[in-house]
Image (spheres, helix red, strand yellow):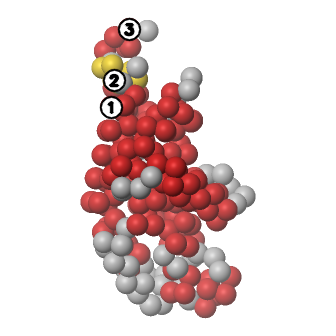
Amino acid sequence: MFAIFGKKKIKEDLVANIFVNSMLDTIDNGFPEIAGIINDSPEFVACPNIDPINSDSFTLIVIAANLSFIPSHLHNSKDERISSLILSKFSHVFDVEEDKFARVIKNYTCYLNKVNHPSKNMHYAMSKGIFGKYQLNQFQDEYFRNMNSPNPMFLKRIDEAMDSFIWNWESFKQKYQIT
């Protein structure tokens, strides 16, 4: 009960700033590793040659997935307000109109849900989204290429790597009280 007194109070706008800056930093520093994992995957018969600076689709996948996790961690309309602030801040960073950026994120969220259907696990959808958006099927052996399905060993490796790109709301909420 007294643990709440030890938490630092933080405003929703600052939460959105921290989230956006942290996501961008994590993506900028982490995508070259993801590109390396993809390019060095033994499941591919040819190297996909993913450019370590070609992170546009990856960035949108990570943002869309992380925004979809917010409602399960924040309640009482905080999820909607913070998500809206985050979208606004990302739109300014990318110099895009907010409603256009929101539509792009919604489209990516729908895409992730579609490629991962019937599962609703967004964490795994991120890996399948990467597989699709970077057109990796063409680099697989004939068996998986003909099935038009990612090799499960490749997905497992990318799933593990994607853990680093998921915002840890539980840890954040242990340190901060959002006001």
Q: Earlier in the sequence, mark 3 or mark 1?
A: 3
Residue 14 is tagged as 1
Residue 13: image location, x then y, percent: 37, 31
Could you say which is closer to the camera, residue 7 or residue 40?
7
Single out the mark in the foreground, 3 or 1.
1
Residue beneath the point at 45% across and 67% down: 57
Q: Is residue 164 visible?
A: no
Neighbor class of circle 2 (other Cα within 10 Å; few <14, some 14-19, many 20+) is: few
Query: Which quadrant does the C terminus fall into?
Result: top left
Q: Does residue 179 show up?
A: yes
Number of numbered callouts drawn: 3
- Within 10 Å of disc 1 (Cα), the crowding (few <14, some 14-19, many 20+) is few
Amino acid type for the residue under numbered disc 2 = Ile
Kind of residue at badge 3:
Phe
What whole-number distance in Å separates the C-alpha atoms at marks 2 and 3? Answer: 18 Å
- The relative height of residue 28 versus residue 81 in the rendered view (above or below) is below
Question: Is 141 located above or below residue 128 in the figure?
Answer: below
Query: Closer to the camera: disc 2 or disc 3?
Result: 2
Q: CA distance from mark 2 to mark 1?
A: 7 Å
The residue where tag 3 is placed is: 2
The picture places residue 168, in percent across and down from the top left corner, at 41, 40
Q: Looking at this rendering, what residue extends furthest in the top direction?
A: 2
Determine contact: label 3, label 1, CB under 8 Å: no
Say which quarter of the image contains residue 89.
Answer: top left
Numbered tag placed on residue 10 in the rendering: 2
Q: Which mark is residue 131?
A: none
**Which residue is depicted at the point 58% across and 75% down?**
150
